[in-house]
Amino acid sequence: MDNRLSESAENFTWLVSNFVSEVPGVEHAIVVSSDGLLLTASRDFPEEHAEQLAAIASGLQSLAEGTARMFGKGDSEQLILRMKHGYLFVMSISDGSSLAVLTSKEADMKIVAYQMTLLVENAGHVLTPQLRSELREIVR
């Protein structure tokens, strides 16, 4: 198999890694497909952990969407899980996939949420079916 990425795929994975390096307190980020498959992970995030986080984020997103529908509250936009030593943010991307971000305890939640929104708004449109397919093949 040829593991070289197209320019679009390389740019997308770079954006995710750059998000981690540029936003204070962000440690790791992934993009997960609507069916729970890891599409891309930030640099230096062990693949095993990235795949586990993809499954977790997908499950949480599914629960949130079901809850929102059940109570007539519209679409789920973002989840924030506060843990003793950090946060997990999960934000929907328009195509049903999600951006999941792990942060340190010191991260400013407002800044992380704002920067995630910018990333999703500015880069979500490039996550075409073709790009998702390419990213799935590379991650395997």
Image: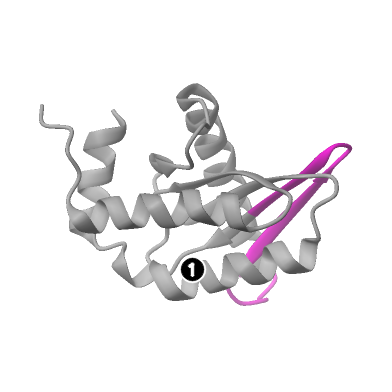
Q: Which residue does the image show at 28% across and 28% down from the upper left?
A: 140
Give the percent coordinates (x, y) of residue 87. 76, 47
Q: Is residue 87 rendered to the left or right of residue 9?
A: right
Give the percent coordinates (x, y) of residue 22. 60, 57
Q: Is residue 79 above or below residue 13?
A: below
Q: Quadrant of the N terminus?
A: top left
Q: Which residue does the image show at 22% across and 36% down from the upper left?
A: 137
The magenta segment? 69-89
Reading the image, the residue beneath label 1 is 120
80 is within the stretch colored magenta: yes
Give the percent coordinates (x, y) of residue 47. 46, 26
Residue placed most toward the observer, 66 or 21: 21
Q: Which residue does the image show at 68% across and 66% down from the upper left?
A: 113
Residue placed most toward the observer, 3 or 18: 18
Residue placed most toward the observer, 66 or 1: 1
Q: Residue furthest right?
A: 84
Q: Residues within 10 Å of mark 1 (few under 14, many from 20)?
A: some
Local secondary structure at mark 1: helix
